[in-house]
Amino acid sequence: MVTQPKSKHIPRATIQRLATYVQVLENFARDDVEVISSNPLAEACGVNGSQVRKDLAYFGEFGIRGVGYHVTSLIAAITSALGVDREWRMALIGVGNLGKAILNHGEFRARGFNIVGIFDCDPFKIGEIVHGLEVHCTKDLKSMVVELGIEIGIITTPPERAQRAAQHLMDAGLTSILNFAPARIKVPERVHVEYVDFFHHLYALAFNHTQARY
């Protein structure tokens, strides 16, 4: 059963915290913790108890007053609310070092994000088998999206090729893109792009480290 939010306007920060709650709850579950209250959960997630309760309230009432949350039930409720309680089939464009590292990352498949098609424009890579998948030409993307039931695209190309990769994904009908390339891409409003830029985090660390010295 899918947990539907009470509002369609859920803050982005809330979605990100919910993902953190799931990771932390999974750790508690591995330690055989069956019930947890909001305060220890919040402490483990680096927020406060009222924030946890506020975030969960977007999706209904969870937990028992004076007792806490049943860990496995809360994991199921959050993953249902986020839509990650099913398989998401993905295509990856750019089978270079970063692309291969992501293909080797077993956590994607473990969490239901399954890369089922990999693509590149380099003729020397096409036909190569990487982690059990054959590299296809990006020109084949549109037909394979339908054939393989792909819903999400991942870009791991060099920055100068990111826009072209995004266009291939959009031409194939995909409206959800995860971009690892250090470049901003132009897309229409109907297309949602998430950016993973390591340098943003490194710049933040460098700035905070510099500030701490003064």
Image: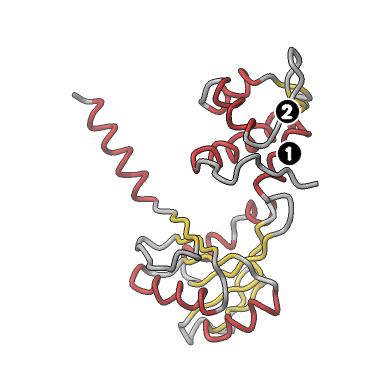
- Residue kind at label 1, given as amino acid type: Ala
Query: 60 or 174: nearer the eye?
Result: 60
Contact flag, marks 1 and 2 (Cβ < 8 Å): yes
Q: Is residue 30 above or below residue 63?
A: below
Q: Residue at x 60, y 38 (%)?
A: 18
Q: CA distance from mark 1 to mark 2?
A: 9 Å
Which mark identifies residue 77?
A: 1
Name the colour scheme. Answer: secondary structure
Q: Secondary structure at mark 2?
A: loop
Q: Residue at x 63, y 76 (%)?
A: 145
Q: Earlier in the sequence, mark 1 or mark 2?
A: 2
Q: Is residue 20 above or below residue 200?
A: above
Q: Position of residue 78 (x, y in %)?
A: 68, 39
Which residue bears the numbered disc 2? 62
Q: Secondary structure at mark 1?
A: helix
Question: In the displayed image of the protein, which residue is found farthest to the top?
Answer: 66
Q: Residue at x 53, y 86 (%)?
A: 139
- Residue kind at label 2, given as amino acid type: Phe
